[in-house]
Image (tube, rainbow, N blue to C red):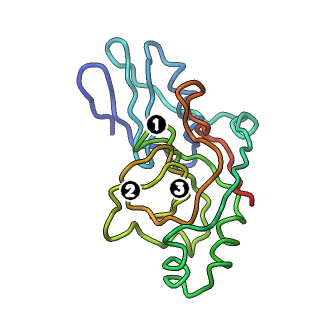
Amino acid sequence: MVARLGDRAILLPRPTGISARAIVTSARDWDGVVDVVVTRDEVAVYFDREPHVGTFAASDDDAAESRLVELRAHYDGPDLEDVARAIDTTTDDVVQLHLAPTYVVETIGFAPGFAYLVGLDARLGAIPRRASPRSRVPAGSLAIAGGYTAVYPFDSPGGWNLLGRVSEHMFTAEAGARLRLGDRVRFVR
């Protein structure tokens, strides 16, 4: 079902089986589109005039357009032991479970450059947000919660479980966000 968001935007349910990159690419081809925001469940399309409703089509070359980005991870986070206890394993196993997958940037939100990465091992994916959020999570913190992993691009409040940190800056004013929709991400030591 399509819902209006004011007089220049529409909200659609996110199609299943189509990557965020393909959705954005397809929607940007519509006449008058100025922005597309993809979340886990919905797509907001913003126009420079009265909205046009079309359909999304998956791009055959979607995977070919994605980049592989490696991020150097240091697993020394304050929640690493709690996560290990929650899934009845060791911290070394948690690290290996987190290092093993190649993740995909599903959506970007919360803060500029905050990329929600899918592909987390199911055991780690079952870990919920913390019961009490922190008032300050340092930039570069590597975290998991609710089936996602992410790196905080800025110092900010946050409720995710901190496994460690990455060396790279996730957002700069000059370069913008390090990760883009559809990018494949590997954490390395």
Badge number at residue 74: none
* Residue 41 in the image, given as x and y percentages of width and height: 41, 48
Question: Relative to 160, is 5 above or below?
Answer: above
- At mark 3, the secondary structure is strand
Question: Relative to 18, is 45 above or below?
Answer: above
* Residue 95 in the image, given as x and y percentages of width and height: 66, 71
- Whether label 3 touches label 1, CB < 8 Å: no
Drawn side of residue 103 relative to residue 147, left or right: right
Estimate how packed mark 1 is, as few (under 14), some (14 to 19) or many (20 or more) residues with alpha carbons within 10 Å: some
Badge number at residue 112: 1
Q: Amino acid at mark 3?
A: Ser
* Residue appearing at x 70%, y 64% in the figure: 99
Looking at the figure, which quarter contains the N terminus?
top left
Estimate how packed mark 3 is, as few (under 14), some (14 to 19) or many (20 or more) residues with alpha carbons within 10 Å: many
Estimate how packed mark 2 is, as few (under 14), some (14 to 19) or many (20 or more) residues with alpha carbons within 10 Å: some
Q: Residue 84 sits in which quadrant? A: bottom right
Q: Which residue is mark 2?
A: 158
Q: Residue 159 sits in which quadrant? A: bottom left
- At mark 1, the secondary structure is loop
* Residue appearing at x 57%, y 52% in the figure: 117
Q: Which residue is mark 3?
A: 141
* Residue appearing at x 56%, y 27% in the figure: 26
- Whether label 3 touches label 2, CB < 8 Å: yes
Nearer to me, 166 or 30: 166
- Whether label 1 touches label 2, CB < 8 Å: no
